[in-house]
Amino acid sequence: MKLILKLIMLLLVTANSIHAQEGIPTNITKFATINFPTESKVIETQRETVYTAEDEFGYYIASTVKFTNQQSSQITKESLQTLYQGVAQGAIDAANAEVVSMDEVFIQDIPALEMEYNAPSNSGMPSKRFKKIIYVDQHIITLDFWPVTSQKNLVNENKTKFFNSFSVNAVETEQPSTVQNNQENTTDIAYETGFLIGKISFFVVLLVLLAGVILLVRYFIRKNKKKKTQIHPIKKPREQITEIICQKCDSKNNSNARYCSTCGYELKKK
């Protein structure tokens, strides 16, 4: 499975090598952008919008969920970390994963959460995964990087490049209120959101992987067909010598004869 994954990644990076150097800016909401290394694919449901891209280093995912006005009214500045913890726990449970680290960070002065976790490796998916969670303007936005390389410098470089490319536009966005809320409701909403995003992310990457397998199979089928249809030159059979003409008297002699039967001259075979 790992060999297939590497071959798929090789094909993907070959197809998308033009875009991979600078990244492709993508509007994931009206107020937020992020750079994907290659052209991203979009999957939309009733609540979620998921963007995915891949290259030879891993999978890149950006998910957005818009809360209703009622849900947003329950989120305060004080409850943001509770919200993030709930989203994180839902994602961890969805992947049956173990947390490696979890830290509070800031993105353009907006509180956010960054985490690293390990998922089971028997699914054929990357085991090590990284996630950032931020709440802006009634939206929970999660950024994920699932590396397929084990080289730490490449993992850190591509994770940092992807996460740091996220930007909130300089527009008036609605910030969490300072009104006291029901913390239990916030936790429930957050957990459900994180769990749902985690499941969707898994199936999206699985679909990308299956598409890559199909692409790989088709590539080898076409390659084998070309080999079978190649025209090889037909070798002309060598003429069999049945008789030898004597160069001295022009008499015909048996092909096995060494001397001419008429004049005794030594025969020369072609």
Image (cartoon, helix red, strand yellow):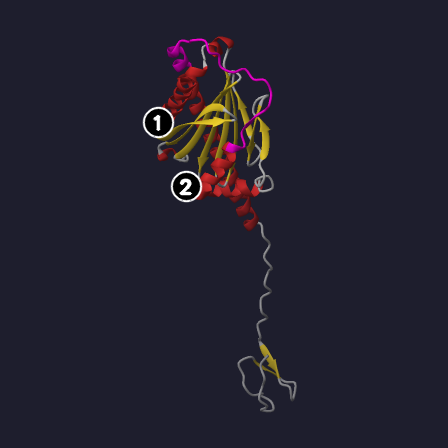
The residue nearer to you, when weighing 132 against 97, is: 132
| Segment colored magenta | 164-189
Query: Does the rendering let one see residue 3?
Result: no
Question: Residue 82 in the image: x percent, y percent?
Answer: 39, 18
Question: Residue 136 in the image: x percent, y percent?
Answer: 51, 19
Q: Residue at x 60, y 89 (%)?
A: 262
Which element carries disc 1, helix, strand or loop?
Answer: loop
Give me the disc on residue 96: 1
Query: What crowding class fits label 1: few (fewer than 14 Cα within 10 Å), some (14-19), or many (20 or more)?
Result: few
Q: Residue at x 53, y 29 (%)?
A: 166
Residue of label 2: 2
Q: In screen coordinates, is 141 left or right of 169?
A: left
Which element carries disc 2, helix, strand or loop?
Answer: helix
Q: In the image, is residue 101 above or below residue 175?
A: below
Question: Residue 176 in the image: x percent, y percent?
Answer: 49, 14
The residue nearer to you, when weighing 68 against 227, is: 68
Calculate the distance from the C-alpha at mark 1 to the C-alpha at mark 2: 20 Å
Q: Earlier in the sequence, mark 1 or mark 2?
A: 2
Viewport quadrant of the N terminus:
top left
Kind of residue sitting beneath label 2: Lys
Viewport quadrant of the C terminus:
bottom right
Q: Is residue 187 magenta?
A: yes
Residue 180, by quadrant, is top left
Q: In screen coordinates, is 68 left or right of 100?
A: right
Question: Residue 61 in the image: x percent, y percent?
Answer: 49, 29
Query: What crowding class fits label 2: few (fewer than 14 Cα within 10 Å), some (14-19), or many (20 or more)?
Result: few
Q: In the image, is residue 68 above or below residue 215?
A: above
Residue 188, by quadrant, is top left
Give me the disc on residue 163: none
Residue 153, by quadrant, is top left
